[in-house]
Every structure is written in structure tokens, then in C-alpha cells.
Image: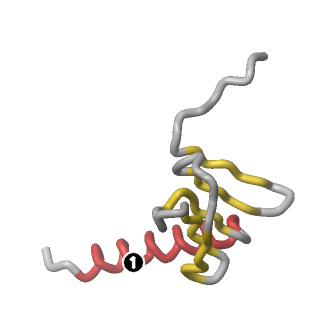
């Protein structure tokens, strides 16, 4: 099967390491900033975002989804009809 290049942005999950990587640009990474525990922003030489790396991704995504859904349900439950 030929190696077909995916369009950007690309999302790759590395199951063994439980890392989710979002590639926005193929420019070289010049710096990185930890923006929250387990979430790192990857920057090019101009300080522009070129990627995001999430460690312990399965737990991070699960917790993010649960918090988001619970918050939306709470907002729906308290709205007057």
C-alpha cells in the first residue's frame, strides 16, 4: 500500500506511550511550553504554534469530556422552562 501523506492538521495517537500529538505544521520545533500538566505547546522559530502534545492522553481526554458534558448537563438542568 502506498504511503499517502495526510493533510494538516494531523492527529496521531501513540498507544504504548499514551501520547496524543496534534501536528499543525511540519516546520521545525524551536521551543515548547507546558501550558498545563501533561499538555505541551510546540512552537516554531517565530513563536507560532505548530503542534500540541498530550501525555497520559486517555485519562486527559476522558476527564475533559466528562467535565465538559457534566457542565453542559448542569447548565441545561438549571435553565428555567
Q: Is residue 67 above or below residue 5?
A: below
Dividing the picture into quarters, in which one does residue 20 lie?
bottom right
Q: Is residue 49 left or right of residue 76?
A: right
> Closest to the observer: 4 or 64?
4
Which percent across, then down, holds residue 5?
A: 63, 29
Q: Quadrant of the N terminus?
A: top right
What residue is rendered at 46% in x and 63% in y?
48
Q: Is residue 37 above or below residue 31?
A: below
Q: Is residue 63 left or right of residue 20?
A: left
Q: Is residue 45 left or right of residue 21?
A: left
What residue is rendered at 60% in x and 79% in y?
34
Which percent across, then down, holds residue 25?
A: 54, 48
- Looking at the image, which residue sits at the far left? 81
Dividing the picture into quarters, in which one does residue 28 lie?
bottom right
* Mark 1 lies on residue: 71
Q: Is residue 40 above or below residue 1?
A: below
> Closest to the observer: 54 or 7?
7
What residue is rendered at 68% in x and 66% in y?
57
What residue is rendered at 35% in x and 79% in y?
74
Which percent across, then down, holds residue 11?
A: 61, 48
- Looking at the image, which residue sits at the far top? 1
Dividing the picture into quarters, in which one does residue 6 lie?
top right
Which percent across, then down, holds residue 3?
A: 73, 23
> Closest to the observer: 66 or 50?
50
> Closest to the observer: 39 or 78?
39
- Looking at the image, which residue sits at the far right? 16
Q: Quadrant of the C terminus?
A: bottom left
Q: For the residue labelled by badge 1, is the local secondary structure a helix, a strand or a loop? A: helix
Amino acid at each position: 500500500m502506498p504511503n499517502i501523506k495526510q493533510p494538516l492538521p494531523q492527529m496521531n495517537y501513540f498507544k504504548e506511550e499514551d501520547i496524543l500529538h496534534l501536528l499543525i505544521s511540519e516546520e521545525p520545533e524551536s521551543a515548547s511550553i507546558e501550558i498545563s500538566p501533561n499538555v505541551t505547546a510546540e512552537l516554531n522559530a517565530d513563536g507560532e504554534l505548530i503542534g500540541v502534545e498530550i501525555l497520559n492522553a486517555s485519562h486527559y481526554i476522558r476527564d475533559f469530556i466528562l467535565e465538559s458534558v457534566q457542565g453542559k448537563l448542569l447548565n441545561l438542568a438549571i435553565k428555567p422552562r
